[in-house]
Image (tube, rainbow, N blue to C red):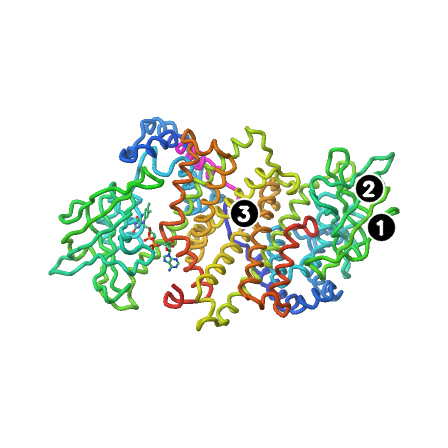
Amino acid sequence: MISFGPTEEQEMVRDAMRDFAEQAVRPIARECDEASEIPADFLQSVWDLGLTSTQIPESYGGGGEERSSVTNAMILEELAFGDATLAAAATSPSGFANAIVDQGSEDQKKTLLPLFCTEKFHAASLAIVEPGAIFDASRPRTVAEPKDDSFVLSGAKTLVPLGDRASHFLVTARNGDALDAFVVARDAEGLTISEPELNLGLKGLITVGLELERVEIPKTARLGGDAGADVRRILDGSRVALSALMLGVSRAVLDYCVPYAKDRVAFDEPISKKQAIAFRLSDMHIEQEAMRLMVWKAASHLEKGLDVSRVAHLTRGYCAEKSLWVTDNGIQTLGGHGFIREHPVEMWFRNARTLGVLEGLIAV
Amino acid sequence: MIEFTLSERDQAQLDRTREAALICRKYARYHDENEGDFPPDELPEAAEFYANQKPLPEASADDTAPPVMMALQSIGQFWGDYSVRVRRTGTGGLGNAALSAAGTPEQQKKWSGLTLSMAITEPGCGSDPSMVSTSAVLDGDEWVLNGEKIFVTTGIRAQGVVLWATIDKSAGRAGIKSFLVEKGTPGFEVPYKEKKLGIRADDTAVYVFKDCRIPRENLLGLDESISKKTSGGFRGVMKTFNMTRPMTAAMGLGLAKAALDFTRDELTAAGVALEYGSGLGSQTAVAEKFMRLEGLYEASELATLYCTWMAGQGLPNNMESSVCKAHAGSAVRAITQGCIELLGPMAISRDHLLEKWMRDCRITDIYEGTGEIQRLIIARGLFDYTREDLK
Ligand SMILES: Cc1cc2nc3c(=O)[nH]c(=O)nc-3n(C[C@H](O)[C@H](O)[C@H](O)COP(=O)(O)OP(=O)(O)OC[C@H]3O[C@@H](n4cnc5c(N)ncnc54)[C@H](O)[C@@H]3O)c2cc1C
């Protein structure tokens, strides 16, 4: 069936997240951007909502709720409506945990999942992006060479979220011709973790680079163990998640521009009465609606276990292009004021440009 | 639940649509090049096609709602051709939609068997229907109609028309009413068919009314009052757009989908790999551009299905119908024009249908309210503005 009706539960979760975003996220967004830091108690407050732990099976200490990618995408949209940076930071542990739930070996589940089921915020991260031009997540330059009972990882990663505190990294690498992922502990020998990186957007989210210099890890550290894993699916899930963030940012811009345009007077009338402005905001509305429907479809395909590579790819491409357009034109709608950091629009623009080129980070 | 899969029955229905569409496609070029020659009401293949139809699987709770299926079937049908049909059944003129939205029960009974066109546009007025100048003057128990209408879809085939005319020009929109007029009524003439860029097999006609007399009860909805508050006739008819706009979007999307499918096949045959999930740096420029067009299509199709889904749920979808129409209007232009760019010189040959699809779907952003008019409607919704606030 083709249907666009959220379940009652989804509506409840969405409303709750909308309130949370308004009360707890938006008010601190600018501060975090300026300070390039997110207060630990904010991350803890999202952790207390149980977004990560409830979706981990009971046998590993979690809440055992069935994970819905659609619900998660809705949560991300709402949180990102508050602020995409805070949304990404708060949900980045889920990206790691969900990969283990879906594709980890029994051994990996047993040792790693309980980490996310305590009351204290716990960071572990996807390490997917690599430095240098022509980066392609499906063709990492990081390589994993089998050696006796271990793999030797060599390469570099960048934009690893919360890498300053993450206990583990899920590192994607080329294993022969195959795309694989490996669990690497923070203290692995040969792993160097950089100082926090300085980025254009998502500034509050601390990201780091990883240098992997012949990091030797046991065979069992390969995601899924001997059976291996479908790493593309993790990438797909991350593309949907990033798209949901881009959607949330775009909605924030529209929501900010509508009252602004009605209020701002030029040439004797509100600028909202000028078609050049009004039509632009119409297009913002059209695009945020289109983005949402694409995110829903891709998330639903993920949730149903259908092949989602194509849809996730198209969704990400669409959301990247359109969210950039929306945020860019958000600035234009405010004119010079859009350029000033007193208003959040320039921050949303930087965040959209940043999200649009990222991979990994989070996943639904 | 939010989901995007098709039931067996949904799929079987769409397979049927596709089969019919493939038959229609065989005649597409002929009717494009022979504008004067109407597609017949029935193609030679019709009898065999219907006789061999496999029965549909049983209906189930997993089936997609009818309005959504209607949009999908429309996409499938127009994927074949814009105007040619295996067999034309039912009425299905734009005027019929207006009749069912605003007609009295007696009017529905009397007129619903006829194919009705809808004539709003005039030489001097299109986007702003409140400027309609065709007049209706009550004379005893008859309305006397005078004026000219242009661009009337199904204008030749239709057996009657829902005609927009003013009963009091000074009253603006409140004075505009719709009238049911049967072909053959003295004073109602159809002088010629328009010559067009595309959808050439569609009979788009000009109507002229010269002292054309119709019974008083032919006023659609029977509301003769001119108070602003009760301009119900106008509103009622405008409301029909909430379902016709997504259907119009679907029609254009069918053509865009045809263009994408053709282009994908040609690109694949030429050795272009479409690697979904690979980074920009690993794509060829052609593959990357093609995927963008596919994304545009996906977004547009979803917006259209969403709007029809809302209609099926009985939810107000005024904004959404403009959203999907505006989105599709831009998308199908970009897609078909982009497909020609991607395939290069081969694409302009009339040996293929791609150039025709580009011409055909250009109408999507024009009729049923241009893209600009849809954006006006959306902006009014966003700002909570009236027509007077923003026009
Ligand atoms: C093939 C075909 C079939 C059609 N079928 C029918 C039919 O069955 N019945 C019927 O009644 N009509 C029909 N039409 C008419 C169609 O609906 C009109 O052409 C359309 O609404 C635009 O009106 P117009 O051509 O007068 O353009 P105009 O109204 O003159 O518009 C010209 C341009 O100005 C823009 N514009 C107008 N007003 C505004 C505004 N307020 N703000 C910003 N921009 C504005 C328009 O978007 C457009 O770009 C058909 C047209 C065609 C070509």
Question: Which dot, 3 or 1, sits closer to the camera?
Answer: 1
- The reply to whether discs 1 and 2 touch (Cβ–Cβ < 8 Å) is no
**Image quadrant assignment for residue B256:** top left
> Residue B2 colored magenta?
yes
Query: Does residue A171 appear to the left or right of B110 in the view shown?
Result: right
Crowd around label 1: few <14 · some 14–19 · many ≥20 (10 Å): some
Q: Is residue A270 left or right of residue B283?
A: left
User: Mark 3 near ligand 1 (CB under 8 Å)?
Assistant: no
The residue lying toward the viewer, choosing from A107 and A341, is A341
Residues at circles 3 and 1 in contact by the CB criterion of under 8 Å: no
Distance between mark 3 and mark 2 Cα atoms:
41 Å
Q: Secondary structure at mark 1?
A: strand
User: What is the number of the mark on residue A154?
Assistant: 2
B243 part of magenta stretch: no
What secondary structure is marked by label 2?
strand
Q: Where A274 sits versus B258, above or below?
A: below
Residue at 26% from the left image edge and 58% from the top image edge: B132
Q: Which residue is mark 3?
A: B3
The span from disc 1 to disc 2 (Cα, nearest Å) is: 12 Å
Residue range highlighted in magenta: B1-21
- Chain of the residue under label 3: B
Dominant secondary structure of the magenta stretch?
A: helix
The amino acid type of the residue labelled 1 equals Thr
Nearer to the camera, B110 or B232: B232
Q: Residues within 10 Å of mark 2 (few under 14, many from 20)?
A: many
Q: Amino acid at mark 2?
A: Ser
Query: What residue did someone put label 1 on?
Result: A192
* Disc 3, SS: strand
Q: Quadrant of residue B35?
A: top left
Residue that lies at the very extreme toward the left in this rendered image: B140
Dot 3: within a 10 Å radius of its alpha carbon, few (fewer than 14), some, or many (20 or more) residues? many
